[in-house]
């Protein structure tokens, strides 16, 4: 089985605590990776997914930042040094703020005037599910996601490949 075949779209895991950290959901997606080392910690999963972003993704993000800065969207996405970050509620780990953490799940994200988003990284035995949830705060947030969603799915799957 190829690596890409081990990352597939899925339903939101019913055990995820995401509902506690986002008011309403206008957009969501979820991908599951199978064959994950069952002994890896949730923090190690987060670090593997969000560290060392490929050059092509960094380039896309720079283009995105130039375009959306005109409309007042937050473009400060550098974040903290993920390797030195402290995983606790409220801390910035990589690009995202931690909202929730336990042994199986980390919920992180950011709030912006146009949209709020949360990402859930849920590890269960030898699987990891990455789910994204977005609330549009205005029409521009909806328009933004219309253009970003197709690329977002490709990027999430690409970043999850580091787990397998």
Image: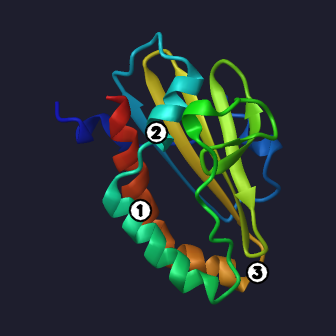
Q: For residue 117, which quarter of the picture?
A: bottom right
Which residue occupies 23% across, 35% down? Answer: 3
- Total of numbered circles in the picture? 3
The N terminus - image quarter: top left
- Residue at image mark 3: 138
- Distance from disc 1 to disc 3, alpha carbons, whole Å, reads 27 Å
Vertical order, 151 against 46 (above or below): below
Callout 2 crowding tier (Cα within 10 Å): few <14, some 14–19, many ≥20? many
Q: Which mark is residue 49?
A: 2
80 and 157: which is toward the camera: 80
Q: Is residue 70 visible?
A: yes
Which residue occupies 40% across, 40% down? Answer: 160
Which residue occupies 68% across, 77% down? Answer: 73
Q: Is residue 4 left or right of residue 63?
A: left
Q: Is residue 23 left or right of residue 143?
A: right
- Residue at image mark 1: 58
Q: Is residue 12 left or right of residue 9?
A: right
Mark found first going from the N terminus, 1 or 3? 1
- Distance from disc 2 to disc 1, alpha carbons, whole Å, reads 14 Å
Vertical order, 126 against 51 (above or below): above
């Amino acid at each position: 089985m190829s690596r890409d075949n081990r990352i597939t779209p899925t339903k939101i895991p019913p055990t995820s605590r995401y509902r506690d950290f986002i008011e309403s959901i206008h957009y969501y997606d979820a991908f599951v990776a199978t064959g994950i080392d069952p002994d890896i910690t949730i923090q190690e999963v987060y670090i593997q997914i969000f560290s060392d972003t490929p050059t092509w993704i960094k380039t896309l993000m720079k283009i995105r930042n130039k375009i959306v800065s005109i409309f007042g969207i937050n473009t400060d996405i550098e974040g903290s040094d993920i390797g030195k970050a402290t995983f606790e509620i409220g801390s910035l780990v990589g690009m995202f703020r931690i909202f929730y953490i336990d042994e199986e799940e980390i919920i992180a994200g950011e709030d912006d005037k146009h949209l709020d988003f949360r990402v859930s990284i849920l590890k269960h035995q030898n699987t990891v599910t990455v789910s994204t949830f977005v609330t549009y705060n205005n029409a521009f947030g909806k328009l933004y996601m219309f253009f970003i969603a197709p690329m977002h799915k490709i990027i999430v799957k690409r970043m999850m490949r580091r787990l397998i």
